[in-house]
Image (spheres, rainbow, N blue to C red):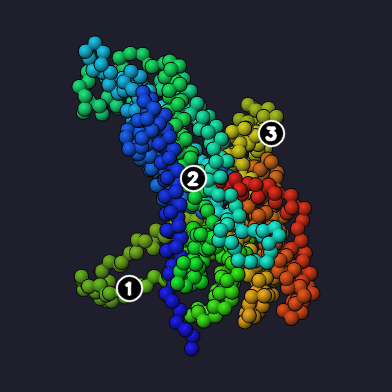
């Protein structure tokens, strides 16, 4: 009789607290930066008071933090796993422009900019002359300098919102577990050194110079555009809008137009650039801090997140079975860490055989193998028409007899009128007209129209002109114009359907594709099988090793054949057949298969693997030149994506 298993806590009960702690770390980073910016806005008439957090600098820092807080909350609400998959940039734009999330993103950035503009204006001294209300000659009037600042920051928020949506800054890119050089025995990980990667603080510090340059370029570009061009169009409408709002609080004159010239000066431009730079720093540092914190390894104090559960294996299995992409992706990432670094957890997986739905290994084996096989399923379904769902047959209601309104006509009553079915008469008339051997009016007039049109064309057009309007020539002209449009530097790339975009959509799915899930699944499945040689005392894993080897072989061969035979679209002018995400998945599958072959080659006969199976597996696991060439570039690209997405 099997012992009762403790209650299995859901995996999200351990993942969500970890993500909340990381969100608190992100908020702390933004708050520290807000305090630094608050110091830059302080009046340095003393060397002591401006540094005290409990005074005015602290209150100003909290106000600045509140301005950026909506952006951080927006990131939590709209974050997703993986990259957006589409055939072209135009398809991406058509799918995202009219979404509510796009409008919400742009509106949130505009609101953040509006709040920061008011905090900034309130923090400036009176002698700067950029408060909302100016008092001149005993009259109270609206100060256009403050209006210029506010309009500039609103434009900055609008531009940054568009950049956020276009660059897909809501994307979270998880890491991939790889073999550590010189440490292939899978010993227990040292708790004092919980991660062999760089800490999040070091990663943010490395990107600090780049972010400063980006913020400076964005602030200068938007300020110059507003100073030279945009403010001319927004001046009158902005003046009327803010004047109507401020009339509720101040006694303003009834003049509905600006009373003086626009505030053009280099002093105004310089202060506008500085305010835009401070706001951009908050946005970008908050963005990077959020990405770095939310994509940290699923570990706590050097141990997997599920280790705190009373039933660690059950909680991990709950996460792997979750239908939410984020939870399942983190659980698969944790399983890959367990397969590499945690011997005790691996042994617990191999020895957990008394579960209600089957042994722990069998369930992990099914989930990971299903993840790998989903690639082959998408390849097989590519290009096929979706199978229509069987329509349910309508249940006809029983026909109720109608009430008789008149007495039936007697058979011998010759004077009674005969009933006429008008619908049948109309149908019979149309049928005779259509199927009659005679000629219709259209058939009579068509030859006359064609002959007249040909006579007019012979009189007006030359032979070259008539050849130019032929359908074949028109199609050729349209093709030439389309190719010329595709070669334009800005418009062309929007409509080009590149090879890598179409292949990722076909292989990894839509609307989002996260390649780390497949890579971690292949790594976890292969390394657990390898470690089972020394740690599986029941010998349950060896029964599934042949299936794993054959499945990896089939998926690799199918993926390579599909990639090599995948046609290039006529709009793809680069003719490049490189696809980074698919190459990463293919390399991970080959590494996993190579590890299995290296470990189980001496036992191939006992596992009932034929020579043909081993030969095909070795051929599939062999790295080709195309696989080795982009590998280093893909590793560098993934390291950058883990930081900036």
Within 10 angstroms of label 1, few (less than 14), some, or many (20 or more) residues?
A: few
Residue at the image point whose x is 49% and y is 63% from the top: 305
- In space, the residues marked 1 and 2 are separated at their CA atoms by 64 Å
Q: Mark 1 and mark 3 in contact? Answer it, CB < 8 Å.
A: no
In the rendered image, the residue lying farthest to the top is 137
Residue at (51% x, 59% y) in the render? 301
Specify the label residue 289 is tagged with: 2
Residue 376: image location, x then y, percent? 63, 64
Where is residue 333 drawn, in percent x and y? 56, 61
Judged from the image, the secondary structure of the residue bearing numbered disc 3 is helix
Q: In this view, does 453 lie above or below 364?
A: above
- For marks 2 and 3 on the same chain, the one whose residue lies earlier in the sequence: 2
Pointers 2 and 3 in contact (CB under 8 A)?
no
x then y, percent, for residue 479:
65, 38
C-alpha distance separating marks 2 and 3: 64 Å
| Residue at the disc numbered 1 | 397
Circles 1 and 2 in contact, beta carbons < 8 Å: no
Distance from Cα at disc 1 to Cα at disc 3: 63 Å
Residue 377 appears anywhere in the view: no
**In the image shown, does 144 or 391 lie closer to the viewer?**
144
The quarter holding residue 544 reads bottom right
**Secondary structure of the residue carrying numbered label 2:** helix
Q: Residue 467 carries which label?
A: 3
Neighbour tally class for label 3: few under 14, some 14-19, many 20 plus, Cα within 10 Å: few
Residue 508: quadrant of the picture: bottom right
């Amino acid at each position: 009789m099997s012992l009762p298993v403790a209650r299995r806590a859901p995996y999200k009960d351990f993942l969500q607290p970890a993500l909340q702690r990381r969100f608190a770390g992100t908020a702390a980073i933004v708050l520290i930066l807000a305090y630094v910016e608050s110091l830059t806005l302080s009046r340095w008439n003393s060397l002591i008071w401006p540094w005290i957090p409990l005074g005015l600098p602290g209150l100003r820092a909290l106000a600045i933090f509140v301005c950026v807080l909506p952006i951080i909350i927006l990131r939590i609400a709209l974050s997703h796993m993986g990259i957006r998959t589409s055939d072209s940039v135009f398809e991406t734009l058509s799918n995202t422009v009219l979404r509510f999330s796009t409008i919400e993103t742009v509106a949130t950035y505009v609101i953040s900019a509006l709040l920061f503009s008011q905090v900034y204006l309130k923090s400036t001294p009176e002698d700067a002359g950029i408060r909302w209300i100016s008092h001149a000659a005993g009259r109270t009037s609206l100060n256009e300098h403050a209006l210029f600042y506010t309009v500039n920051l609103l434009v900055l928020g609008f531009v940054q919102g568009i950049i956020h949506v276009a660059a897909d800054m809501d994307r979270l890119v998880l890491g991939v577990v790889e073999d550590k050089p010189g440490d292939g025995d899978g010993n227990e990980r040292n708790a004092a050194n919980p991660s062999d990667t760089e800490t999040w603080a070091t990663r943010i510090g490395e990107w600090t110079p780049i972010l400063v340059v980006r913020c400076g370029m964005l602030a200068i570009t938007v300020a110059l555009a507003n100073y030279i061009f945009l403010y001319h169009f927004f001046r009158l409408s902005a003046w009327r809008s803010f004047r109507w709002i401020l009339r509720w609080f101040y006694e303003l004159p009834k003049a509905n137009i600006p009373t003086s010239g626009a505030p053009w000066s280099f002093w105004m431009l310089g202060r506008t650039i500085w305010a835009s730079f401070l706001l951009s720093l908050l946005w970008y540092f908050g963005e990077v801090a959020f990405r770095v914190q939310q994509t940290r390894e699923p570990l706590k104090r050097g141990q997997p997140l599920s280790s705190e559960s009373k039933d660690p294996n059950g909680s991990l299995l709950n996460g792997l079975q979750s239908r939410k992409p984020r939870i399942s992706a983190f659980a698969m990432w944790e399983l890959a860490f367990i397969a590499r670094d945690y011997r005790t957890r691996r042994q617990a997986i191999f020895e957990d055989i008394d579960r209600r739905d089957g042994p722990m290994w069998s369930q992990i084996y099914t989930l990971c193998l299903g993840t790998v096989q989903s690639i082959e399923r998408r390849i097989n379904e590519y290009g096929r028409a979706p199978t229509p769902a069987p329509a349910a047959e309508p249940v006809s209601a029983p026909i109720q007899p109608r009430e008789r309104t008149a007495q039936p006509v007697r058979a011998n009553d010759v004077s009674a009128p005969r009933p006429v079915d008008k619908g049948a008469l109309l149908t019979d008339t149309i049928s005779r007209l259509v199927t009659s051997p005679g000629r219709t009016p259209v058939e009579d007039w068509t030859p006359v129209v064609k002959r007249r049109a040909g006579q007019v064309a012979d009189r007006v057009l030359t032979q070259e002109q008539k050849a130019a309007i032929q359908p074949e020539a028109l199609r050729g002209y349209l093709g030439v114009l389309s190719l010329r449009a595709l070669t334009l530097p800005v418009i062309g790339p929007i409509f080009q359907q590149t090879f890598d975009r179409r292949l990722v959509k076909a292989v990894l799915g839509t609307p989002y594709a996260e390649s780390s899930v497949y890579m971690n699944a292949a790594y976890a499945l292969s390394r657990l099988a390898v470690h089972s040689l020394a740690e599986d005392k029941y010998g349950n894993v060896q029964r599934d090793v042949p299936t794993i080897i054959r499945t990896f072989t089939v998926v690799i061969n199918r993926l390579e054949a599909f990639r090599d035979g995948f046609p290039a679209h006529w709009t793809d002018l680069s003719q490049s057949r490189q696809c980074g995400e698919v190459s990463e998945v293919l390399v991970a599958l080959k590494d996993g298969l190579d590890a299995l072959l290296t470990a189980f080659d001496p036992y191939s006969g006992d596992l009932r693997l034929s020579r043909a199976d081993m030969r095909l597996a070795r051929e599939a696991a062999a790295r080709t030149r195309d696989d080795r060439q982009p590998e280093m570039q893909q590793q560098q690209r993934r390291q950058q994506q883990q930081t900036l997405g």
